[in-house]
Amino acid sequence: MKNRMRELVDVLNKYAYEYYVLDNPTVSDKEYDKLYDELLLLEKTTGEVLFDSPTKRVGGEPISAFKKHKHIERLYSLDKATTQEEIYSFEKRINKDAKDLVYTVEYKFDGLTICLTYDEGKFKCATTRGNGVEGEDVTAQVLTVKSFPLTIDYKGKIEVQGEAIMRLSVLEEYNKTASEPLKNARNAVAGAIRNLDPKVTEKRKVEIMFYNVNYSSENIFSTQVECVEFLKKNGFKVHPFLRVCNGIEEVMSAIKEVENDRKTLDILTDGAVVKVNDFEKRKELGATDKFPRWAIAFKFEAEEVTTILKDVIWQVGRTGKLTPLGLLEPTELAGATVKKATLNNYGDLKRKGVMKNARVLVRRSNEVIPEILGTTEINEKCEPVLKPSVCPYCGATLNEIGANLFCPNKKCRPRVIAKLTNFASKNGMDIEGFSEKTAGLLFDEFGVEKFSDLYTLDREKVRSLEGFKDAKTDNLFVSIDKSKSVNFANFIYALGIDNVGKKTARDLSNQFKNIENLKIATKETLLNIQDVGDIVADCIFEFFNDKENLLEIERLLECGVNIQEEVSEVIGGVFAGEKVVLTGTLSEFKRDDAGKIIESLGGEVQSSVSKKTTMVLAGENAGSKLDKARALGIKIIDEETFKMLIKS
């Protein structure tokens, strides 16, 4: 046992040094926590704690390049729970000393803890948590952050605690032009604050979310709710989510709410923080050597993990673009076994330093295929990923455009299958029962490669295909025939024009009303449409100036496809002049249907919140769009108000 303890201590200290000092982690939080918990169990079993065990420490030592700063009061870390049973155990422990407790539940942000000191109403310094007693003075770096006040109303001495974060959208934009992409938002902000050059901090657009007053020279509030209100009143940025819970059942309900909502946020979160609301009861409960007894962090399943990249294969999409797909050593991530993860293109693969047999960092978010964020460890067995020169499916010589590789063969099997599947999709012609597998069968058996080929299929030949019995064949042909009547926006989407999604398809439909107008649209006319830039305008213009594309549209019309012209917008409707963004889940409407109602009543539906937005329709579990709307002072309506408006 002692040998295993020694081994665990050495490994955990190495990982902590890489994470806290070098800002270059080689393992995920989940892997670290698993080893940490094993060490805790061994220490409990043996009754022995090694002198350099990480369980003795709240955090790592300050980086020597920064001045050290001693906190007025110790900054504690939080004990953690990962199951409902552990939350119930937490309540049972503290209810031995205090009954009928009221709790608060807040987001647990995944960034870097920052403590700001104020005296006589003026900002004095900013520090990291460090080891809880002493941190690093990062005043010059934090001064580049614009999400906290330099002066406050309170004139006593005070330490205010928050979490420095980098928004996911900011990270995405930063990585588009970065010579070395950042692995994730947590590491990005840690590297920004701990960088000796404040210009680096400023470039990464760091923000601080505040949630606690660690010390004040006077007793200015008595509950967590009052503490948060104090922060808001004094100009600190506070996340709007705060639930006050009477009992542990309400606490669990709030935790589930956090878990559901966090996937829609533009901020990295890894859990929820539960606190006793009343400060007097907190004093009664006290603290251990490491944690306050009155608070606990509920941590969710990891959405990032490291694993070994075994190989890379190449997939071809409907535009001919090749996307590298990583084959992974199977690993558990966000409740699922992950075996594959994507990279954007060959340029992305090279920038991230991805190699076969290397350890890579993988993220899974919003139930989409996981993405490889970067490489964390390279060894002597690693091999470079070679850039293909020919298409792996048809053998055509590839074209290289910027960071992307393209197969030029329009008859390449995966290209055709992807185009047919997109054409038949719900946002396109809405052909029920038509899947990627169906597209593959039709291509392989009958050479179906054009959209119009679907409308000339022989029913008896299709019936002879494996798996196509009478009912399935009949249903498919009924759906194909039904799809001949299609609204203009869906038809545009079905054509599969590069960079044209359902929002742009709807905008084109509203602008041009019918296919004949769209065919002759100039680039200048296209650029006048909101959210259509040079690249999208070029794609649309080139599509309708390609003779084969125009011929295919004529074939579809000859097959009986009837494109319903867009009805002119209602003038003077209840949403006339409004630019509306929809966010969250509506109980009685699909978002697309609600959008169509808004447009039919004179409004314009936008995909993102901006200064031009005049209204936001917010359903359940609305996320970052709602936060931004509140920050900009934009009018917000709920579903009940929406229903009243459309009935008026």
Image (cartoon, grey):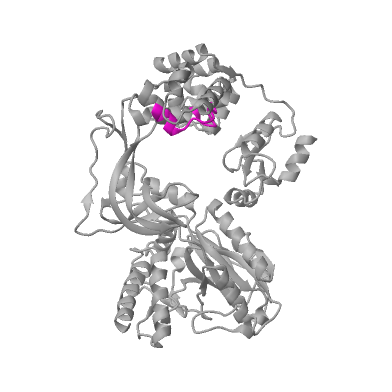
Q: Is residue 433 magenta?
A: yes
Quadrant in the picture for the C terminus? top right
> Is 191 situated left or right of 231 in this image?
left
Residue 159 visible here: no
Give percent across and percent down for residue 162: 54, 67
> Is 403 situated left or right of 579 in this image?
left
> Is 82 situated left or right of 322 in this image?
right
Query: Residue reaching furthest top?
Result: 558
Q: Nearer the viewer, residue 459 or 181?
A: 459
> Is 250 situated left or right of 486 in this image?
right
In the displayed structure, would residue 198 be above or below residue 275?
above
Q: Is residue 134 magenta?
A: no
> Which image quadrant is residue 4 in?
bottom left
> Which image quadrant is residue 324 in?
top left
| Residue segment shown in magenta | 424-441
Seen at 60% across and 50% down, the residue is 628
Seen at 24% across and 46% down, the residue is 385
In the displayed structure, would residue 130 be above or below residue 322?
below
Quadrant in the picture for the N terminus? bottom left
In the displayed structure, would residue 80 be above or below residue 205?
below
Residue 63 visible here: yes
Seen at 60% across and 63% down, the residue is 255
